[in-house]
Image: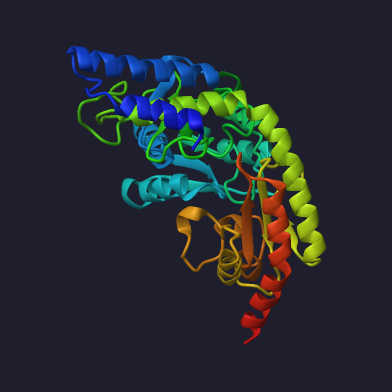
Amino acid sequence: MLPEAIEAMTEQLKRVGNASSLHAAGRQVRRVVEESRETIADALGARPSEVVFTSGGTEADNLAIKGLYWARRPRRRILISSVEHHAALDPAAWLADSQGAEVELLDVDEYGRVHPDTLRAAIERDPDGVAMISVMWANNEVGTIQPVHVLAAVAHDHGIPFHTDAVQAIGLLPVSFADSGADALTLTGHKVGGPMGVGALLLARGLTPVSVQHGGGQERDVRSGTLDAPAIAGLAAAVRTSVKEQEALGRRLTSLRDELIERVRQAVPDVVLNGDPVNRLPGNAHFSFPGCEGDALLMLLDAKGVECSTGSACSAGVAQPSHVLLAMGADAAAARGSLRFTLGHTSTRDDVDRLIEVLPAAVERARRAGLS
């Protein structure tokens, strides 16, 4: 967590009160919540009234996808990219299984990018039947950045609401809700140096998804639940700080990432870089290691103090190929033999040095294990 987020949370944890209460303590907490809402809106090019607090990115994705689908019935089509995080894919799949939705996965190119023509062609097969469209801003596995502004414009040409999961982008890429053209945008705390368990859905005015959970209607009658003021304060501080420092951090991480990629290629000559080689997240380096099982290589590196990931962190421990790499055209072996290395604000060249020091031996051992 960023120091600013810890400080904001610690200060708020000293107080008591429910933001929905009318007494003095409640009004004080409400002031903190509303100031946090204004801070996030200002940092991300939104209006304060467009910030809907949630428990994190998963809830925000569920609210956007389920809520917009229900609000626009009897339209049944949901267009969603084939490389989305499971927080978006699974709600869409649930709507198909239990609510009669017709979910159509948008194809991607070899870098994991949705082309505007692909989206346009999918819409025009039955434009009046499309309830909503969801394409993430940047991919959580391979780091590819999507042409969100263009895709949103295609959606609006047909009068269809467009949602983007920007969890990976905020704090690493310039993000403006107003300029993006998106109607709904997901963010979460722990990806910007804030706390886990809190996030938000930026929701354009005039757009009213059906609630996913019901109760007190605390957030625009769209989302119910007692607001976690300390977490919200931490989220706001993290968003403000990460956006303020985004340009400098992005430059530093891009340089460090490029060095990491080059040195990994030298250390393991047959390694394959996945995702767009240029238009990718500053801190993302995703590789396939031929002849290796990703889980085995991960554990060997972990034993040497290098922490990385196979596929999406949320599906760690599940022995199945990455759906992202499969959608990009990789075969199952390459998809299973992939690792993601992520650099963040605490990463240094010493971290890259340590990876290169232990990687060749770990790859060799993983390959021997795969042959035995």
**Residue 137 visible to an observer of this rendering:** yes
Residue 269 falls in image quadrant: bottom right
Q: Position of residue 43 (x, y in %)?
A: 54, 20
Toward which corner of the image does residue 253 lie, by quadrant? Answer: top right
Identify the residue at the far bottom of this view: 372
| The C terminus, quarter of image | bottom right
x and y percentages locating residue 286 in the rendered image: 67, 54
Q: Position of residue 164 (x, y in %)?
A: 53, 34
Q: Residue at x 82, y 61 (%)?
A: 266
> Can the viewer see residue 159?
no
Along the viewing direction, whichever of 157 and 55 lies nearer the viewer? 55
In the image, is 232 to the left or to the right of 27? right
In the rendered view, tell whether residue 252 sits above or below residue 291.
above
Nearest the eye: 92 or 122: 92
Give the vertical position of 205 relative to 339 (above or below): above
Write the residue at 62% across / 81% down.
Answer: 369
Residue drawn at the location 51% of the way across and 34% of the way down: 2
Q: How many marks?
A: 0
Instruction: Please say which color scheme the image uses.
Output: rainbow
Q: Is residue 343 left or right of residue 58?
A: right
Q: Is residue 28 left or right of residue 72?
A: left
Q: Nearer the viewer, residue 324 or 131?
A: 324
Measuring from the top left, give residue 114's x and y in whole percent: 64, 42
